[in-house]
Image: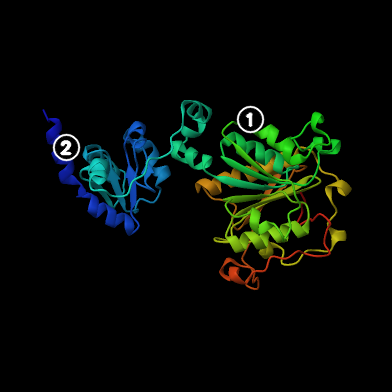
Amino acid sequence: MTTFREMLAATKAAITETDPAGAEAAIAEGATLLDVREPDETAQGVVPESVLIVRGNLEAQVESRIPNKDTELVVMCAGGVRSAFAAKTLADLGYTNVASMDGGFNRWKDESRSWVTPKTLDADQRNRYSRHILLPEVGEEGQRKLLDSKVLLLGAGGLGSPAALYLAAAGVGTIGIIDMDVVDESNLQRQILHNLDRIGERKVDSARKTLTAMNPDLEVITFDTRLGADNIMDILPGFDVVIDGADNFPSRYLLNDASVKLGIPVVHGSIFRFEGQITVFDPLAGPTYRDLLPEPPPPELAPSCAEAGVLGVLPGIIGSIQALEAIKVLLDLGDSLRGRLLAFDALEMSFREYKLNIDPDNEVTYANRDLIKITELDGLCQPQMSTAAVA
């Protein structure tokens, strides 16, 4: 009968091992550190930027968390035993460049290498976000990242309402809201952040009440002001993603130029009558609003929802997709809508996808960020219709 020591010796003979110094050098060159310890162990300390997968979940989760099997991996546990077995398992799964760290986190820490004490979820948070934690692609690590994230909503209206509600429910820790309007009875057909009791109340105050009642983890930062060239560069820095729920050309071009200058992704959404569209403008990795619309169309071609109407449930669909795309950007999940425009027709119940390309003549780019001047787009105050849709 094979003993544990014999099994361990055979496993170590079949894998590559490295020491903490070698692991640190490999990580500096781009290798991924895979920590297979239990949650109570990682709560005591982790190596920054490591991927956490409990050893017992390795086979089920690693292919979704680390899909490229040629990724250089250094596997770490507390002392080097579980990581050795994990390295053998990874090789059996087809991973081609795997090493186990001898001595594990204990030796890493003893040698005074870089480590941090991570934030942990309390019991209430584990219960609240349990369905996220069950997803290998999110897990506790992803949920902590959401709690540390900051999303700015341009508008607390039709698109901002569902987006804000789902971001708050998902546990995005900080939500900023820009809106200078008050709640009107005509808003209630679609703006689900508000209710009859709040007619006449500032929209940002109404939104804060709704969102904080939903999730006590949430910090809501309100900007009861018109977004303009005089304040946008003070508001945007510090936010990870902006959700665009604006309804006019000046705000959208102003947001584009500022977000490009700062390198902040914008999740764009717009609605008009029975149609909507969504895309992600990421100045670091794809086209932006000026690649889609270099110049605004004439105001007479862009009637507002107040003039043309909008089906009340439509912004719920588009705003929810905006929230989903924002979470995907924050967690680097799946394929975002960067470079793709998703158009929705409620009457046909159809989605169509259009490819967006970078316009080589567009000079408002992140590479030219130092030359971008943040100015108002004068003479255009009507709400816009980009391709088929308006917020």
Residue shown at 39% from the left, 38% from the top: 61
Residue flagged by tag 2: what amino acid is it?
A: Leu
Q: Is residue 110 left or right of residue 282?
A: left
Up the image or down, 359 lies above or below 9; here it is: below
Numbered mark located on residue 214 in the image: 1
Residue 327: x %, y % from top left: 56, 44
Q: Is residue 47 left or right of residue 134?
A: left
Residue shown at 56% from the left, 33% from the top: 217
Residue flagged by tag 1: what amino acid is it?
A: Met
Colour pattern of the rendering: rainbow
Disc 2: which residue = 8
Residue 136: x %, y % from top left: 44, 37
Identify the image quadrant of residue 379: bottom right
Q: Compute the Cα span from label 1 to label 2.
A: 50 Å
- Mark nearest the camera among 1 and 2 is 1
Residue 388: x %, y % from top left: 77, 54
Identify the image quadrant of residue 367: bottom right
Whether tag 1 and tag 2 are in contact, CB under 8 A, the answer is no
Q: Is residue 320 left or right of residue 133?
A: right
Q: Is residue 37 visible?
A: yes
Of the residues under marks 1 and 2, which one precedes in the sequence?
A: 2
Q: Is residue 88 visible?
A: no
* Label 2 crowd (10 A; few <14 / some 14-19 / many >=20): some
Viewer-closest of 224 and 366: 224
Viewer-closest of 219 and 90: 219
Residue shown at 59% from the left, 56% from the top: 264
Identify the image quadrant of residue 11: top left
Up the image or down, 120 lies above or below 28; here it is: above
Numbered mark located on residue 106 in the image: none
